[in-house]
Image (cartoon, rainbow, N blue to C red):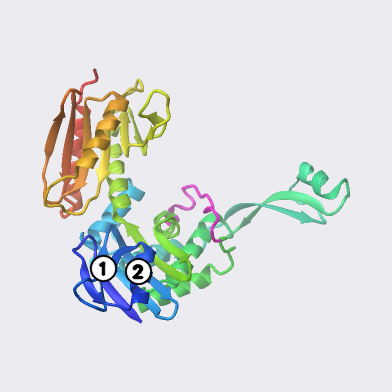
Amino acid sequence: MTTIHLVEHAPPVPRPLSDVVGRALAASRIVDAAPDPYLPGHWRLRAGSKVGAVALTVPGAGTVTLRITPKVPIARLFFLLGYALSPHTIPDDGAVDVAEHTEVLPAFAHAFERQLARALTQGLVQGYRTTEESAFVVRGRIREADQIRRHFGAAVPVEIVYDEYSTDIAENRILSAATERLLRLPGVPGNVRRRLAHHRSRLADVTPLVRGHALPVWRPTRLNARYHGALRLAETVLRGASAEHDEGQLRIDGFLFDMNKLFEDFVCTALREALAQHGGRAELQARGIHLDRDDAVRIRPDFVWYADDGRPRAVVDAKYKAEKQEGFPDADLYQMLAYCTALGLPDGHLVYAKGNASYAAHRIRNAGITIQQHALDLDQPPGSLLDEIRDLAERLAATTLV
């Protein structure tokens, strides 16, 4: 088995690979891969913004394990993730220590297992689950429309719906599916894998989720409070952050974070929380905004803050970028100019993960618009990081509506 280690957004590196494996990596679209023009038998590989671990099963070449390490410390990555998922959750004394890990998947599997163990300490949460079925005895309510449509007036079987109190509820089904998912991934430490297998046996009686279907809906309540942390991590495993698909004859199975999305979620969530004291309404991934008068060109800023009367007050876009010697990309300025024009705002704000450029402001000719670019330093303690967000929020709040 071939194992390849890369670092997020690092310069391309040559690796001795067969053409079959090199083409498979290029087809995966997880990393940039191209034959090295100077070293025969080598491919130049470059990781983008996705971090984590995947196993690629390549026909005729076996399994290739690809591990991509983030530039930010693992503990900082988990802070960004945790805050974006639940900004009001205050870590307790038993908070998971992930600083000992240098790779994403082992740290995440460890964190999830600890949260799951705490969730299941007092046993499985029970609740009511709505069940629809055909039966020969009436239980609950008769579904009259289904009875007529399916049985044409016959007395039995009866189409019924009822609520059953059991452990086979959405919360346990999500935890079970995430546990199964992690047990299949490469790079989960052996001791964590054994504990996950033990938890899986405790969840063995719940109905498995159907692959490709939407996750069941759960709502935070007092009764399932001890599940909240584990459920949020479980949903991260099962929604979008994981990769498990076939690309032609190439099978990809793994767990990846997109740092672009993680940074965007953190910045927008933290701004929403910081601006709450100033009133108004914050909308993440704002919808219903168009660039033209005919509403044919839709635009979707990451963050729009509206005043109490509904007028746009500030617009922000979060951009997690690779470091560039020339500074911030010009294309982001054009995008923000479009947002400010459509929303009628004199100022727009671009927030980057700190690289080689610091704060900059650009006054646009003949437009009366200023675009400000901010650099957020991720390599600092969580409290200082949130202080930077609060400073930006105060700057947004100080903007005067025309």
**Front-lying residue, 183 or 294:** 294
45 up-or-down from 280: above or below: below
Viewer can see residue 110: no
Quarter of the image where the N terminus is located: bottom left
Instruction: Quickly name the residue at label 1.
Output: 45
Question: Among all residues in the image, which is located at the extreme right?
Answer: 154
Horizontally, is 217 left or right of 359 in the view?
right
Quarter of the image where the C terminus is located: top left
Which amino acid is tagged 2? Leu
Horizontally, is 282 left or right of 59 in the view?
left
Instruction: Quickly name the residue at label 2.
Output: 25
Q: Which comes sooner in the sequence, label 2 or label 1? A: 2
The location of residue 41, given as percent across then percent down, is: 26, 79
Residue at 29% of width from left, 51% of height from top?
260
199 up-or-down from 322: above or below: below
Residue at 81% of width from left, 51% of height from top?
158
| Residue contact between numbered discs 2 and 1, judged by CB atoms under 8 Å | yes
Which amino acid is tagged 1? Leu
Residue span colored magenta = 211-227
**Mark 2 crowdedness (10 Å alpha carbons): few <14, some 14-19, many ≥20:** many
The location of residue 190, given as percent across then percent down, is: 37, 79
Q: Spatial distance from mark 2 to mark 1, Cα to Cα?
A: 9 Å
Residue at 75% of width from left, 49% of height from top?
160
87 up-or-down from 399: above or below: below
